[in-house]
Amino acid sequence: MERLDVAQFQKKLAEVPNPQLIDVRTPEEYTGGTIGDAVNMNFHSDDFEQNLNSLDKSKPVFVFCQAGGRSLKSAKMMQELGFQEVYELEVGYSGWEH
């Protein structure tokens, strides 16, 4: 798992074809704007771990939340679930240029 700043996250995201980009904020936060075509998987939902398990663990995953707390926990959870490459936006969506 790597924690990346905005520039590193953008660069890495651009290098990966068809990235798995996951927004772990609430649906309400997600509808207020997101990064690219990120998929919303609410960290606080009961089926969050099940949703993570639906992703391809052999392909890079990019994860972010609002400020970095939930995405860090999510990234650690992904590591425990066997994901090979996880990139987390350390400043969250609040630090993203939008």
Image (cartoon, grey):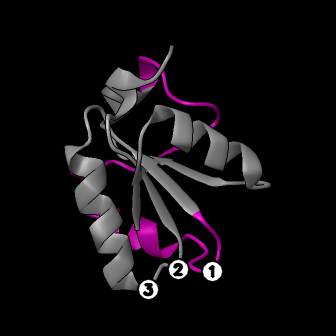
Residue bearing mark 3: 82
Residue drawn at x 65%, y 72% is 59
Place of residue 47 in the rendered image (x, y in percent of width and height, measured from the top left) = 31, 65
Question: Please, what is the three-letter code of the amino acid marked with disc 3?
Answer: Gly
Question: Please, what is the three-letter code of the amino acid marked with disc 2?
Answer: Gln
Q: Is residue 80 above or below residue 49?
A: below
Residue bearing mark 2: 84
- Cβ atoms under marks 1 and 2 closer than 8 Å: yes
Residue bearing mark 1: 58
Q: Which mark is residue 69?
A: none
**Label 2's element?**
loop
Q: Looking at the image, which residue sits at the far right?
A: 17
In front of the other: label 3 or label 2? 2
**Which circle's residue, 1 or 2, is located before the other in the chain?**
1
- Viewer-proximal residue, 3 or 38? 3
Place of residue 80 in the rendered image (x, y in percent of width and height, measured from the top left) = 31, 83
Left or right: 34 in relation to 36: left
For the image shown, how many numbered marks are present on the structure? 3
Q: Is residue 72 above or below residue 52?
A: above
Is there any visible trace of residue 53 in the rendered image? Answer: yes
How many angstroms separate mark 1 from mark 3 (CA)?
A: 9 Å
Task: Inspect the magenta stretch and tell me whether residue 40 lies in it.
Answer: yes
**Label 1's element?**
loop
* Pointer 2 local density, CA inside 10 Å: few below 14, some 14–19, many at least 20: some
The residue stretch that appears in magenta:
31-60
**Residue 18 occupies which quadrant of the picture?**
bottom right
Task: Inspect the magenta stretch and tell me whether residue 51 lies in it.
Answer: yes
- Viewer-proximal residue, 16 or 47? 16
- Cβ atoms under marks 3 and 2 closer than 8 Å: yes
Question: Please, what is the three-letter code of the amino acid marked with disc 1?
Answer: Ser
Question: Which SS does the magenta portion mostly show?
Answer: loop
Quadrant location of the N terminus in the rendered image: bottom left
